[in-house]
Amino acid sequence: MEPPHSIAQARVDDKGRLKLPAEFLEYLKKLGVDKVFITTVDRELARIYPISVWKANENLFANAGDLAELAEDVAYVAKVFGGDSEIDAQGRVLMPAALRRELALESQPVFLDCYNGRINVAGKSVHEARFHRAMANLSEKVKTLEKKGLK
């Protein structure tokens, strides 16, 4: 199953629930995902991980070798802001309270995109900043990528 290719807008309600847009919900269901781990590791984006993807991250943390201290710090931050959530019958997940507060996600639009096996959730201000950065010198970016094979 291919992930959604677009960015979708959704909302975190006053109880902290995020109703997943239909294409994201369908994607997770087709993968057989009914439980997720939701966190942040950069204090910018919330990340919704299928449990299998999060377990791969935990394995990376556990086997980080000479990066063990770095991995422990990132894992700790993920645990502080994270929590497990089941996808309910209405296609909603509960965003952890600490995460909602840290990223100011409550009662406002959020923007979802799939990346690297997870679903990123950006608040409005982060989405706008990313969009403005992407738009800067866009024609030059396109020309450079066309030289690399962009069709």
Image (cartoon, rainbow, N blue to C red):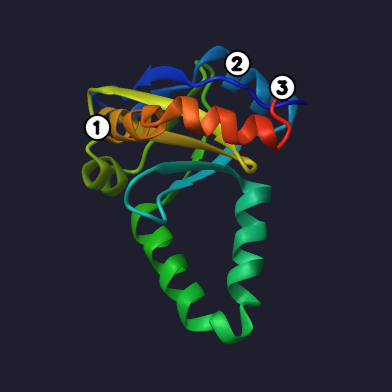
Horizontal side, residue 58 vs residue 46: left or right: right
**Does residue 34 appear in this view?**
no
Looking at this view, name the residue that lies furthest to the right.
1
Instruction: State the residue at coordinates (60%, 64%).
Output: 58
State the residue position of label 2. 23
- Residues 28 and 6: in front is 6
Q: Nearer the observer, disc 3 or disc 1? A: 3
Relative to 105, does residue 63 appear above or below in the rendering?
Answer: below
Q: Residues within 10 Å of mark 1 (few under 14, many from 20)?
A: some
Q: Position of residue 131 (x, y in %)?
A: 36, 28
Q: Nearer the observer, disc 2 or disc 1? A: 1
Relative to 117, does residue 92 appear above or below in the rendering?
Answer: above
Amino acid found under the numbered disc labelled 1: Ser
The quarter of the picture where the C terminus appears is: top right
Relative to 104, does residue 84 appear above or below in the rendering?
Answer: below
Q: Could you tell which of marks 3 and 1 lies nearer the N-terminus?
A: 1
In the structure shown, which secondary structural element does the residue marked by tag 1 occupy?
Answer: helix
Q: Could you tell which of marks 3 and 2 lies nearer the N-terminus?
A: 2
**Cα distance between the residues tagged 2 and 1:** 24 Å
- Residues 90 and 41: in front is 41
State the residue position of label 3. 151
In the structure shown, which secondary structural element does the residue marked by tag 3 occupy?
Answer: loop
Instruction: State the residue at coordinates (39%, 18%).
Output: 10
Amino acid found under the numbered disc labelled 2: Glu
Q: Position of residue 145 (x, y in %)?
A: 62, 34
State the residue position of label 1. 125
**Cα distance between the residues tagged 3 and 2:** 25 Å
Instruction: State the residue at coordinates (34%, 60%).
Output: 80
Amino acid found under the numbered disc labelled 3: Lys
In the structure shown, which secondary structural element does the residue marked by tag 2 occupy?
Answer: helix
